[in-house]
Image: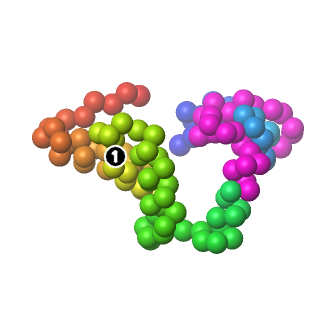
Amino acid sequence: SCKVFYAKDPLKIVHARGQYMFDEKGEKYLDCINNVAHVGHSHPYVIKAATKQMELLNTNSRFLHDNLVQYAQRLTATLPEKLSVCYLVNSGSEANDLALRLARQYRGHQDVITLE
């Protein structure tokens, strides 16, 4: 099932820092696949913020919390008025599902075009 990524031997990645991942032999790989383009792996600010949050509460957005409201307000304050609603979801799959349902409701069409 992983032939797309591993034509020969699979990589065994053991740690990462910044934009690089390292295998068990110490080989360095530029990470162009994972969602690290914004801050990279092991960013000290992100680690500090995540640790602080996990010391307080470690759950997803299915429960109410003031931080969710504050984040949505800060985010929408940077966007045009037409983009004044936030939907906080738990995963990329959930986000894609919601986007499709919203688009279908808005346009009234069921067809979808995707790129591979």
Is residue 83 in view from this perspective? yes
Is 66 left or right of 22, judged from the image as shown? left
**Looking at the image, what colour scheme do you see?**
rainbow
Instruction: Look at 49% across and 67% down and name the residue there.
Output: 66
Left or right of 102: which side holds 18? Answer: right
Query: Foreground residue, 116 or 30?
Result: 30
In the displayed structure, would residue 71 be above or below residue 23?
Answer: below
Please state the horizontal and vertical placement of residue 101, each as a whole percent of the image: 25, 48
Residue at numbered disc 1: 84
Q: Mark 1, residues whose alpha carbon is within 10 Å: few (<14), some, or many (≥20)?
A: few
Residue 44 belongs to the span the image colors magenta: yes
Point out residue 110 in the picture as x, y percentages from the top left corner.
17, 40
| Helix, strand or loop: magenta stretch | loop
Residue visible at 62% across and 37% down in the picture: 38
Residue range in magenta is: 24-48
Based on the displayed image, in which of its 4 quarters is residue 2 positioned? top right
Image height check: is 83 above or below 58?
above
Is residue 115 magenta-colored? no
In which quadrant of the rendered image does the C terminus lie?
top left
Between 36 and 73, the one nearer to me in the picture? 73
Which residue is drawn at the image coordinates 45% and 40% (left, top)? Answer: 78
Residue 16, x across and y down, in percent:
76, 43
* Quarter occupied by residue 53: bottom right
At 69% from the left and 39% from the top, the residue drawn is 40
Q: Is residue 70 left or right of residue 36?
A: left
**In this orientation, which residue lies closer to the viewer: 48 or 41?**
48
Q: How many marks?
A: 1
Q: Amino acid at mark 1?
A: Ser
SS at circle 1: loop
Q: Position of residue 31 (x, y in %)?
A: 68, 33
